[in-house]
């Protein structure tokens, strides 16, 4: 019995026709693996053998299943059963894309080869969802290993000098398997290789092309017969398009050949190369147009298989042994895909963030915060942080506190110190807004709502999702939200998050104060919300129903800050020349505190 660990080359076929052709080119066929050595979940069909010293696994997709998804499924199971696979080959038939520059004919071979720095295969979607354009490129797939690419280059050079042995090898295979001659694996008559002009479309009827389309010179593309100096079949190296639908459209074929340099279309390679990079070899059985038929499929499968055998003969066995196992490459590719997906998600979020920021047009309150923090002297305001009112307010998740005092007494600096304290200690979001009569974007109720909403957007995934829903419902930002929509969106977010702290500074500098206060009342009183609110203003601008929530900034506390600040300044290096003159320092300190009057 064969040992699955001995096999290093994977040769995948999509169709039974391709599988039969591959089997005919094995130097020797091996017995099946012993029972229990294949993964229990692996239901794939395999033929094991050797070519030029390489141990090869031939795998075929289940009958009736082909395309990207089915090929990917084969790989997932196969790697579990044959863990030491080093090189992957996807060999079979495909539809050609002939042009004046690329004289591709039936029976020719196309080999995936890197183009413009990309791998030799790119993935496309072709179907109802892209009817307008018919075709959507979804990205180039990775190229095979250096060992594989080196062997391809060496074989191409050898064929240029000496020609290939595809015809001889096919004749030898058919001699050993004569039954295949009558089953479509021999070369069809040359006159059956007809390339119709792109505007000649085969009708949906079952009639032959001869009957439906005709064979006159106005219907067919004129091509010179190949002579003895030409390779026949020819081998073409370049780009293969792999997707989820059969291409039967000559106009689209020509467009892709012209714009992308596509030589061939097929349906399985993307499913494999999304898992790990491999070499794709296709024998041309039709021209990717409406004139498809199966007459050339067997022979095209033979030419692809014959080329692949020559390719394997070009790779030294010892080079394959040194290669990394494809299971490792698959894992690395999976990790790479995850990284790319994460980066794409990050870019998507960043783009959405930019769009929402531009849509909300919120004023930046952090400017006011940073300006105030820069003027805050360490140690001042401690009297307030030690107060019972602040302690009770901070200890609850649903509370209200209103600080008021005369102009210039340091309310904004104190509120900024409170914000800094909350930002450094609490997990729950803290958001804030500074009303500022000198800034036209920081005066109104709507300005406050926009700013608070944007801050929450950047602090919470929940807020982000809700805000994006609002953004999308406004024609992805092409319509501005109304005041009520802003208020409702912010309210819904606060209801979902719970425990948010909101600081509103200098309420007396706002316009529409009554509207803002009503919002504060509604937010504080709502049974479904747990919000901690703190408001500052010059004076108690309106009556608040709960007197215990109102804290006038007492002169005693402010004088303590002034005294603390003055003393620190007088004992700094700035007044080093007063060293030893304590009476003078005390006199200056007392005079300043008396004159300040809490300012």
Image: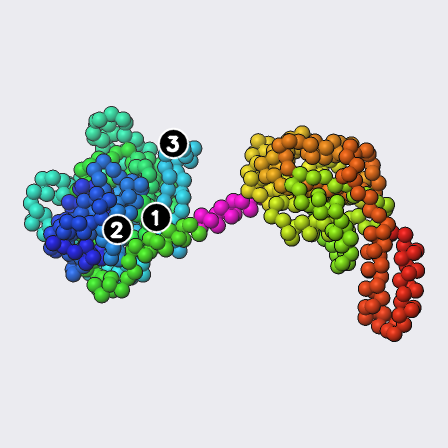
Which quarter of the figure is the N terminus placed in? bottom left
* Residue beneath the point at 81% across and 64% down: 568
**Label pair 3/2, CB-CB below 8 angstroms:** no
Sequence-first tag of 2 and 1: 2
Q: Nearer the viewer, residue 24 or 40?
A: 40
Mark 3 crowd level (few <14, some 14–19, many ≥20, 10 Å Cα): few
Report the residue marked by disc 2: 80
Give the alpha-carbon distance from disc 3 to disc 1, as whole Å.
23 Å
* Residue beneath the point at 65% across and 53% down: 424
Range covered by the magenta-colored residues: 340-355
Give the colouring mode of the picture. rainbow
Sequence-first tag of 3 and 2: 2
Give the alpha-carbon distance from disc 2 to disc 1, as whole Å.
17 Å
Q: Secondary structure at mark 2?
A: helix
Report the residue marked by disc 3: 128
Residue 274: give its label. Answer: 1
Give the alpha-carbon distance from disc 3 to disc 2, as whole Å.
36 Å
Sequence-first tag of 3 and 1: 3
């Amino acid at each position: 019995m064969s040992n699955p660990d001995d096999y290093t080359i994977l040769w995948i076929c999509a169709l039974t026709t391709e599988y039969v052709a591959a089997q005919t080119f094995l130097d020797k066929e091996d017995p099946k693996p012993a029972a229990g050595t294949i993964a229990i979940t692996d239901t794939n069909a395999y033929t094991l053998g050797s070519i030029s010293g390489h141990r090869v696994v031939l795998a075929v997709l289940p009958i009736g299943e082909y395309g990207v998804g089915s090929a990917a499924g084969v790989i997932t199971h196969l790697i579990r059963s044959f863990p030491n696979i080093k090189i992957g080959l996807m060999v079979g038939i495909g539809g050609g894309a002939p042009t004046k520059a690329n004289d591709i004919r039936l029976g020719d071979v196309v080999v995936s080869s890197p183009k413009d720095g990309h791998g030799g295969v790119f993935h496309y979607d072709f179907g109802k969802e892209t009817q307008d354009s018919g075709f959507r490129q979804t990205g180039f797939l990775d190229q095979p290993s250096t060992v594989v690419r080196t062997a391809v280059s060496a074989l191409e050079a050898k064929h240029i000098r000496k020609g290939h042995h595809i015809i001889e090898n096919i004749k030898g295979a058919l001699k050993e398997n004569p039954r295949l001659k009558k089953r479509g694996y021999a070369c069809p008559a040359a006159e059956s290789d007809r390339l119709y002009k792109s505007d000649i479309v085969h009708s949906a009827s079952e009639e032959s092309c001869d009957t439906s389309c005709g064979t006159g010179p106005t219907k067919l593309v004129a091509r010179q017969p190949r002579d003895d100096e030409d390779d026949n079949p020819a081998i073409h190296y370049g780009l293969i398009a792999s997707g989820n639908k059969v291409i039967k459209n000559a106009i689209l074929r020509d467009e892709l050949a012209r714009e992308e340099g596509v030589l061939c279309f097929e349906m399985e390679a993307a499913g494999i190369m999304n898992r790990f990079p491999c070499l794709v070899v296709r024998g041309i059985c039709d021209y990717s147009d409406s004139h498809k038929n199966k007459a050339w499929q067997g022979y095209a499968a033979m030419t692809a298989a014959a080329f692949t055998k020559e390719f394997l003969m070009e790779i030294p066995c010892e080079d394959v042994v040194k290669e990394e196992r494809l299971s490792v490459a698959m894992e690395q590719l999976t990790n790479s895909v995850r990284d790319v997906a994460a980066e794409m998600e990050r870019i998507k979020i960043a783009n959405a963030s930019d769009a929402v920021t531009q849509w909300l047009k919120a004023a930046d309150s952090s400017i006011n915060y940073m300006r105030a923090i820069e003027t805050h002297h360490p140690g001042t305001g401690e009297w307030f942080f030690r107060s019972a009112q602040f302690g009770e307010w901070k200890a609850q998740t649903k509370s209200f506190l209103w600080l008021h005092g005369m102009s210039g007494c340091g309310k904004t600096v104190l509120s900024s110190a409170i914000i800094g304290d909350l930002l450094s200690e609490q997990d729950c979001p803290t958001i804030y807004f500074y009303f500022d009569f000198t800034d036209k974007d920081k005066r109104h109720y709507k300005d406050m709502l926009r700013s608070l909403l944007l801050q929450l957007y950047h602090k919470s995934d929940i807020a982000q999702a809700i805000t994006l829903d609002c953004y999308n419902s406004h024609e992805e930002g092409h319509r501005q939200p109304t005041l009520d929509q802003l208020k409702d969106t912010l309210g819904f977010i606060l209801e979902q998050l719970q425990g948010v702290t909101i600081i509103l500074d200098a309420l007396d500098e706002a316009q529409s104060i009554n509207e803002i206060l009503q919002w504060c009342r509604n937010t504080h009183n709502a049974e479904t919300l747990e919000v901690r609110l703190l408001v500052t203003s010059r004076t108690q601008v309106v009556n608040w129903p709960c007197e215990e929530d109102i804290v006038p900034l007492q002169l005693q506390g402010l004088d303590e800050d002034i005294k603390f600040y003055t003393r620190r300044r007088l004992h700094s290096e700035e007044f080093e020349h007063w060293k030893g003159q304590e009476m003078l320092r005390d006199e200056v300190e007392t005079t300043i505190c008396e004159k300040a009057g809490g300012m």
